[in-house]
Image: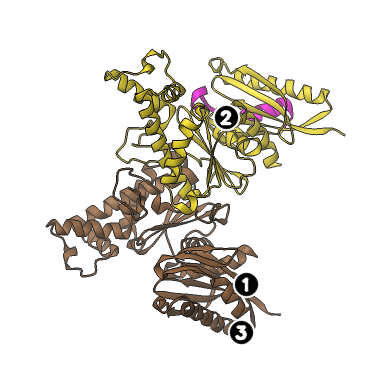
Chain colours: A yellow, B brown
Amino acid sequence: MNNECVIGIDLGGTNIKGALLDLNGEIIEKKETPTLSDAGPEAVVNRIGGMITELEDLARRTGNRVAGVGIGVPGQPEREKGEVIFAPNLYWRNVPLAKYLYRNTGLPIFLENDANVAALGEHWRGAGRGSVNMVMVTIGTGIGSGIILNGQLYTGASGAAGELGHVVIESDGPQCSCGRRGCLETLTSATAMVRMAREAMDSGIKTVLSKEENLEAKDIIMAARDGDRLALEIAEKSAYYLGIGLGNIINILNPDTIVIGGGVSGAGHLFLDPLCRAARDNCLETAGSIVRIAAAQLGNDAGFVGAAKLVLEVN
Amino acid sequence: MNNECVIGIDLGGTNIKGALLDLNGEIIEKKETPTLSDAGPEAVVNRIGGMITELEDLARRTGNRVAGVGIGVPGQPEREKGEVIFAPNLYWRNVPLAKYLYRNTGLPIFLENDANVAALGEHWRGAGRGSVNMVMVTIGTGIGSGIILNGQLYTGASGAAGELGHVVIESDGPQCSCGRRGCLETLTSATAMVRMAREAMDSGIKTVLSKEENLEAKDIIMAARDGDRLALEIAEKSAYYLGIGLGNIINILNPDTIVIGGGVSGAGHLFLDPLCRAARDNCLETAGSIVRIAAAQLGNDAGFVGAAKLVLEVN
């Protein structure tokens, strides 16, 4: 008898990552290829199709049957229609991704937003294992989040739940790209940290950060670890505001676990400790006292691991 | 054969309201008696017990069998133990309410927080009927909320979900009783509206509100309807801040329905229209475009109707 296995694909702006996994989420084989989105949606969809075929061939050779394919997309999917409505980083609008891949592979295809599949991945095989109510918050260009409630992905009435980055925490704060002011991600994303550093450097403040040509948020965290004053100030400020954002989500959802993902979370205790303090300071004790705040464990694998889990969620 | 029915009790700081309902939520009989919490927890528990006995007798006389009793409490229940951990308005700590009533009535007793039972009530029989993902927000002394997800009450990992009143929306805002600054309820509860009016009157601003001896939030809404300038300003400001709070919850939970309860909601369009606008202005369009914002329909009955529903949720 054939064993069942699943394929997870993480479609990113830069790379397509995919893997064949068994039903326990163990990775059998990983693949990676550049997205090359400039070549247009059809070319990208074909590259994904090629990866699926390779992984399915491998499954067949080892006596396994692929139950389905989950795909995390950097944008807004229409799950029933199997379309990607909008994916700004890929310049996609209304791309019938699942329909096309189903026609070419004969496999059931499930689409989900990338923040949601990352949450599913960490819940299945990472820092959120065993959690019942979990929120994964990813600190990147913006702030993304995925919500697991009663052990299952929660996506809301129109699939738009978890927009923690656009929760307003300072109604007269900085302008956000969404048109409002003081959204969490204007105050505490990786982008916001780099912006704060550049503004300070432009105003003449001395810092080791001036040496970095392509300044990233993790450089700021590293410099803070080495005692750089400006970097410390920015890290503290970011932890403070993110703490308010997490406090708000703790007050609303009372989760047992919050998983922090993104490059900054790799900085470990230096960022996570003040963040945990700020989060607990900014929520009511009944909810704050029971929540565990942990760094993500799967790194870049979270996307395809969670995408693979989609197949099992729906079946 | 006996028909089944359920009892719902709404334990408030001032009154105990209760009712016998059929399994469709139709009210067969209502009761109300003062809480008289000064006489101590035992006396209050006995009064509740008496109301349950009366309602059960009535059920028996009409050939019905009571399946259980749900009780909404103004505080924090420990559902498994059947205790009220903390109910500040009643000066209760660790009162074994369900245990005691079970011993005296032999009926299964279910406890839940009052904001949560109100949400259950409106979802079962009121403005939230048919909704899948609903949030009920009650504007009173503070801001309470109850959350229904996938058609069921969501209470979080330790029963503390839905503390919308303590979501921070202005991190340098007014001091809140919880110890933080800029919590939603410091900017937009009934208490906050009255405080704003008093501060303005103390500073010499002329308004028809000066005539009111016991100024309440609904007086402010009524005066706004009549064109009083200060009242209009306060109503607008409150709608603006509450809109930010609702926008945040729409961004996080992407509900199909938000039900607004509390005295202020009775003011109708005057408050609800600017509130709806503010809420939609303060969230992303994918979630904001699909949410229905409606005034509560059950008024003071929501508590015991929702409490009665508890029995059916658990069974």
Q: Could you classify mark 3 by the number of other residues whose Cα lies within 10 Å: few (under 14), some (14-19), or many (20 or more)?
A: few
- Residue visible at 38% across and 18% down? A209
The answer to which image quadrant residue A279 occupies is top left
Disc 2: which residue = A73
Separation of marks 1 and 2 at Cα, in angstroms: 48 Å
The answer to which image quadrant residue B74 occupies is bottom left
Q: Position of residue B44 (x, y in %)?
A: 47, 78
Q: Position of residue A168 (x, y in %)?
A: 38, 41
Chain letter of the residue carrying label 3: B
Q: Which residues are magenta?
A: A87-107
- Residue visible at 71% across and 34% down? A25
Q: Nearer the viewer, residue B148 or A98?
A: B148
Q: Are marks 1 and 2 on the same chain?
A: no
Q: Which mark is residue B108?
A: 1
The secondary structure type at the circle numbered 2 is strand
Q: Could you classify mark 2 by the number of other residues whose Cα lies within 10 Å: few (under 14), some (14-19), or many (20 or more)?
A: many
The amino acid on which the numbered mark 1 sits, given as a three-letter code, is Pro
In the rendered image of this protein, does residue A174 appear above or below residue B276? above
Q: Nearer the viewer, residue B70 or B21?
A: B70
The answer to which image quadrant residue A173 occupies is top left
Disc 3: which residue = B62
Position of residue A63 in the picture relative to residue B159 (left or right)? right
